[in-house]
Image (cartoon, helix red, strand yellow):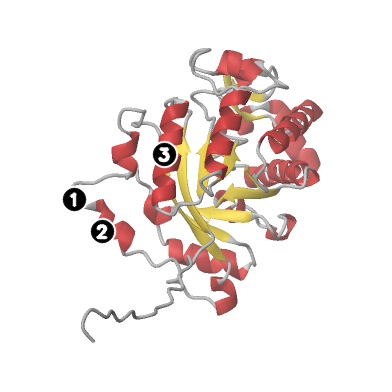
Amino acid sequence: SFGSFTINESKVIDSPRFPHRGILIDTSRHYLPVKTILKTLDAMAFNKFNVLHWHIVDDQSFPYQSITFPQLSNKGSYSLSHVYTPNDVRMVIEYARLRGIRIIPEFDSPGHTQSWGKGQKDLLTPCYSSQQYIQSFGPINPIPNTTYAFLTSFFKEISKVFPDQFIHLGGDEVNFDCWASNPQIRNFMMTKGFGEDYKKLQSFYIQKVLNITASQNKKSIVWQEVFDDNAEVRILYLGTVIQVWKDAQYSKELSKITAAGFPVILSAPWYLDVISYGQDWRTYYSVEPLHFSGSDKQKRLIIGGEACLWGEYVDSTNLTPRLW
């Protein structure tokens, strides 16, 4: 009759396909003020991203202010005003939590650690040239017990500061030249039966760090080299998540890693710092993470994706337009 309304009842059932929908920010190449990080978390919430992968330190600077080892940021940051205090970190974690966003910190090693050596004596490997020490350092020195004593104390703190179940341990782009130049390391390799295979030394180191984080009841994420360079993949904890970042034939990599039973985060097609002339967003949108050969069981191991905005050419002035 006149003036009546008909209401159509509908049910909307909506849920994300993947539990891990991440953004990586890099605060080592350029320091990002806390307010820029908070603004990024707001934008993530608007766009249904639920993980901030905080690549907090790297070769260039160590802005994380450690309570246990204050010299790391005192000597390794760009300046004492370019650090994240315990209060800053708590604020970022809580701001994220209220928006349904997890914070996963990354402390990448044994490579990408030049800034660590400034505040932590004897941590990095001394490099040699024709048997002479040349006043330069390489990756973390995987031989001495002091290395693992330091890492145990450090990751104990990180496990308390960051509540998430995951810690990202890095493990990418380890340059073996310095290790190979160092006479002590060469001797160590011989006694261990590693010969000249420095990937075995890298695996030896990573396994020890995985043991440290596991003892803190944390799960680990590592970059794909840890899987690629590890002939005996079974030494990894099976729950360890592998993050795939190399763009060349990444679908084959997904087949291989999931066949070995490891969960995967895919980043290879979403490196936002790699820009070309043209509309890069078209390629980002055309990606189908499950387009690789493998069983349904393998496809269930793809836990999601992560867009990475590395910071070599990004600071607070251009982060937001580059990212969004």
**Front tag of 2 and 1:** 2
Question: Eyeballing the image, is 98 above or below 301?
Answer: above
Q: Are marks 2 and 1 in contact (CB under 8 Å)?
A: yes
Residue at mark 3: 40
**Label 2 SS:** helix
Q: Position of residue 25 (x, y in %)?
A: 45, 38
**Horizontal and vertical percent for residue 156?**
75, 34
List the residue tagged with mark 2.
Answer: 282
Residue at the (39%, 78%) spot, across then down: 10
Residue indicated by mark 1: 278
Kind of residue at disc 2: Arg
Question: What residue appears at the point 50 percent right and 14 percent down from the top-left corner?
Answer: 81
Please report whichever mark, 1 or 3, sits nearer to the chain's N-terminal start. Answer: 3
Q: Is residue 80 left or right of residue 283?
A: right
Of 176 and 280, nearer the camera is: 280
| Residue at 48% across, 75% down | 293
Closer to the camera: disc 1 or disc 3?
Answer: 3
Tell me the mark number nearer the camera, choosing from 2 and 3.
3
Crowding at mark 3 (Cα within 10 Å: few <14, some 14-19, many 20+)? many
Q: Is tag 2's residue or tag 3's residue first in the polypeptide sequence?
A: 3
Tell me if residue 129 can be seen: no
Tell me: 154 left or right of 264: right
Q: Secondary structure at mark 1?
A: loop
Q: Quadrant of residue 183?
A: top right
